[in-house]
C-alpha cells in the first residue's frame, strides 16, 4: 500500500489550467457569475486547494437558458445533420488530442486512478461522442399507410418527423465528471437540442476544460452552456426553469425525486439515472478464476463510488467461505494512493463528507452483527482514503445491505440449493434495480437468473458490461428511462405527425 500523502506535483499544463480564472460558459463567452460567488475545489488525494471556480446561481441559469433557447432557434437549427455529426466528431477529436491533460485534471479533481481516467475518457468520452455523432444522420420518422377518417385511400399522406425536444438541462454528479458530461452532450447534440450543463460542485474542472474544447471546435454560440454551481441553487433553478424542455439527471435517488417535483411547473420531460445496490450472484459451478477478480473489481471500481457497483455478493453456500476469503485477500492487496501515482489501484473518496458517510455505514455494519472480513478503516494522513471493506454474514435487514453507500463496502451473503426464484427474490429486495451479474457455467441457469433479476442491465460472467451502444438505466427507484444506444436518443426527440389531404 503506497503512502496516501505522497505528493505529486501537477504538470505545467495542468498547473496553468488550474491557475486560470474559471468562469461560466454562456452564449459562447466566458462570463463572471452574477453574484461573484465562487466554489473552492479541492484535491481529494491531498486535501490541497486546486482552484476557485465561479458559482452560478439562478440569474446565471436564466441567462444560460435564454442563450440556449436563442441558439436552438438560430443557426444551430439551420445546420444539416451532417454538420452536427462533424461538430460532435470534432469535439471527440479535440478531446482525444487533449487526453493526457483532460485525464490529469480529472484525477486531480475527482481522485480516480490515472489509467482509469484515461481509459474512461477515451472510451466514454471520445468514442461515446463519436457513437452519437453517427446517429445525427439516422434520425427518421415514418410514413403511415392509412388515410384519416372520411378521406379516401390515396388522397392523403401522413408522415412523422422526429424533432429535437429543445433546451436540455443536464445535471451531473462528481463520480466520473468528464464522461458524465459527454454522456449527456452526445445524444442531446445529435438530436439537435441545445444544452445547459451543470457539473457537480465537487468536480467542475473537466467540464470547464471541455468548455474550452467546445469553443475551439466552433459550435454556434449558446449551443452548449456550462454553469458550475451548487445543487440547491444552480441545480434547483435549472430543474424548475419554465423554459427548459427536458432535464437529464444523474445523481442520488433523493435528489432525483426533487428534480421530478421541480419539473412539474412546466411538465418538462425528465430522465433519471439514480442509485443502485446491485447484486452479483455466484453459483457453485462458476469459474472462480474469473469470479474473484470480476466481483472484486465490480465492487471496488472507482472506490465503489459508482452507481453500477456490485455491492451485494450472493454466493452459493458450498463455495461461500472460499469465495469470501479470496475476495477479501484480493481486496486487501489493492494499492491505495493518489490517482496520479502509477502504483495506485484505488484512489481516495471524493470528500471528507463522503468518507464520513461511508465510515458511518461501516460502524452500522459492525453494530448490526455483520462480520468484517477486511478493511473497515481509513488510511491515516491526508486524503480521503478508505480501505476496501468486505462484510460477510449480511442480510437484507441490515442498513449496509439495503442502502446505497457509494464507497468501497461489499456485503456478502450465502444462498442454498432450491428454487432460483428464491435467490432472485433476495437479490431483488430493496428500492434499486440498476445492474446485476450472474456467475455460472450453466447457460440455462445463467439466462433464467438474468431474466429474473429486476434491473435495467444484467451481465453474465462479468459485472456491468458497458458500451455506448448498450442501453443503460434503472428499474424501480434507480431511474427513469435509458441512456446509451438508440434508446438513449429517444428522450431528446419528440414526434410530430403531419397529415396532408390532397
Ligand atoms: P447529489 O444527487 O446531491 O448530486 C448530484 C448532482 O445533483 C450534483 O450536480 C448536485 O449539485 C445536483 N443537485 C443536488 N441537489 C439538487 C437539487 N435540489 N436540484 C437540482 N440539482 C441538485 O449527490 P451527492 O450529494 O453528491 O451524493 C450523495 C449520495 O448520492 C452519494 O453518497 C450516492 O449514494 C448518491 N449518488 C449517486 C450517484 C449516481 O451516479 N447514481 C452520483 C452521485 C451521488
Ligand atoms: Mg447532495
Image (cartoon, grey):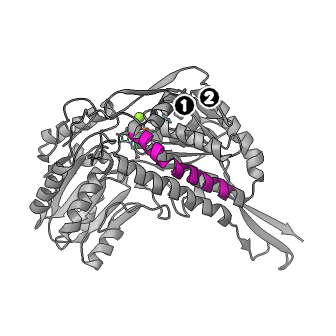
Q: Is residue 416 magenta?
A: no
Q: Which structural element holds mark 1?
A: helix
Position of residue 195 measured from the top left corner of the image (x, y, whole percent): 62, 44
Q: Nearer the viewer, residue 216 or 331?
A: 216
Classify mark 2: helix, strand or loop. Answer: helix
Along the line of sight, the residue nearer the viewer: 152 or 378: 378
Of all residues, the one furthest to the right in this rendering is: 502
Q: What is the CA distance from the residue labelled 1 to the residue labelled 2?
A: 8 Å
Q: Check residue 60 in the rendering and tell me which mark sits there, or answer none.
A: 2
Q: Earlier in the sequence, mark 1 or mark 2?
A: 2
Task: Specify whether residue 493 is in view.
Answer: no
Residue 340 located left or right of residue 492: left
Instruction: Indicate the quadrant of ligand 1 in the picture.
Output: top left
Q: Position of residue 439 (x, y in %)?
A: 25, 68
**Quarter of the image holding residue 9?**
top left
User: The N terminus appears in which quarter of the rendering?
Assistant: top left
Residue 269 percent coordinates (x, y): 59, 48
Q: Name the residue: 46% across, 51% down.
A: 121
Residue at 32 percent of width and 35 percent of height: 8
Q: Residue at x 69, y 67 (%)?
A: 140
Amino acid at each position: 500500500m503506497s503512502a496516501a500523502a505522497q505528493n505529486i506535483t501537477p504538470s505545467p499544463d495542468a498547473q496553468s489550467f488550474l491557475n486560470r480564472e474559471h468562469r461560466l460558459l454562456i452564449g459562447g463567452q466566458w462570463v463572471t457569475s452574477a453574484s461573484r460567488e465562487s466554489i473552492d475545489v479541492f484535491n481529494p488525494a491531498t486535501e490541497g486547494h486546486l482552484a476557485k471556480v465561479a458559482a452560478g446561481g439562478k440569474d446565471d441559469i436564466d441567462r444560460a437558458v435564454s442563450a440556449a433557447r436563442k441558439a436552438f432557434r438560430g443557426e444551430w437549427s439551420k445546420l444539416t445533420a451532417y454538420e452536427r455529426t462533424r461538430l460532435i466528431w470534432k469535439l471527440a477529436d479535440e478531446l482525444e488530442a487533449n487526453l493526457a491533460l483532460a485525464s490529469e485534471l480529472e484525477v486531480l479533481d475527482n481522485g480516480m486512478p490515472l489509467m482509469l481516467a484515461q481509459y474512461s475518457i477515451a472510451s466514454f468520452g471520445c468514442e461515446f461522442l463519436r457513437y452519437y455523432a453517427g446517429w445525427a444522420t439516422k434520425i427518421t420518422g415514418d410514413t403511415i399507410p392509412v388515410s384519416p377518417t372520411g378521406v379516401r385511400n390515396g388522397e392523403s399522406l401522413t408522415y412523422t418527423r422526429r424533432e429535437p425536444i429543445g433546451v436540455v438541462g443536464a445535471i451531473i454528479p462528481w463520480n466520473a465528471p468528464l464522461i458524465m458530461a459527454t454522456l449527456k452532450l452526445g445524444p442531446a447534440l445529435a438530436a439537435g437540442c441545445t444544452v445547459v450543463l451543470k457539473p457537480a460542485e465537487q468536480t467542475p474542472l473537466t467540464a470547464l476544460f471541455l468548455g474550452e474544447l467546445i469553443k475551439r471546435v466552433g459550435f454556434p454560440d449558446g449551443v452548449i452552456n456550462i454553469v458550475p454551481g451548487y445543487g440547491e441553487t444552480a441545480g434547483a433553478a435549472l430543474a424548475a426553469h419554465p423554459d427548459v424542455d427536458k432535464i437529464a439527471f444523474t445523481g442520488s435517488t433523493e435528489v432525483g425525486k426533487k428534480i421530478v417535483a421541480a419539473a412539474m411547473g412546466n411538465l418538462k420531460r425528465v430522465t433519471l439515472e439514480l442509485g443502485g445496490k446491485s447484486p452479483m450472484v455466484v453459483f457453485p459451478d462458476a469459474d472462480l478464476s474469473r469470479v474473484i477478480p470480476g466481483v472484486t473489481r465490480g465492487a471496488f471500481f472507482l472506490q465503489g463510488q459508482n452507481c453500477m457497483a456490485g455491492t451485494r455478493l450472493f454466493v452459493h453456500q458450498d463455495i461461500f467461505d472460499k469465495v469470501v476469503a479470496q475476495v477479501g485477500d484480493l481486496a486487501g492487496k489493492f494499492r491505495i494512493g493518489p490517482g496520479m501515482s502509477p502504483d495506485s489501484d484505488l484512489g481516495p473518496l471524493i470528500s471528507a463528507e463522503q468518507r464520513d458517510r461511508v465510515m458511518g455505514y461501516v460502524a452500522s455494519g459492525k453494530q448490526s452483527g455483520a462480520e468484517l472480513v477486511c478493511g473497515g478503516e481509513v488510511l491515516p494522513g491526508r486524503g480521503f482514503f478508505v480501505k476496501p471493506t468486505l462484510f460477510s454474514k449480511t442480510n437484507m435487514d441490515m442498513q449496509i445491505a439495503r442502502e446505497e453507500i457509494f464507497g468501497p463496502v461489499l456485503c456478502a451473503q450465502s444462498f442454498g440449493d432450491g428454487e432460483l426464484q428464491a435467490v432472485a427474490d433476495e437479490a431483488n429486495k430493496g428500492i434499486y434495480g440498476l445492474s446485476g451479474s450472474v456467475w455460472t457455467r450453466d447457460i440455462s441457469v445463467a439466462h433464467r437468473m438474468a431474466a429474473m433479476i429486476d434491473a435495467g442491465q444484467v451481465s453474465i460472467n462479468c459485472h456491468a458490461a458497458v458500451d455506448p451502444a448498450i442501453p443503460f438505466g434503472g428499474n424501480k427507484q434507480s431511474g427513469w428511462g435509458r441512456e446509451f444506444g438508440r434508446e438513449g436518443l429517444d428522450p431528446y426527440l419528440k414526434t410530430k405527425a403531419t397529415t396532408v389531404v390532397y
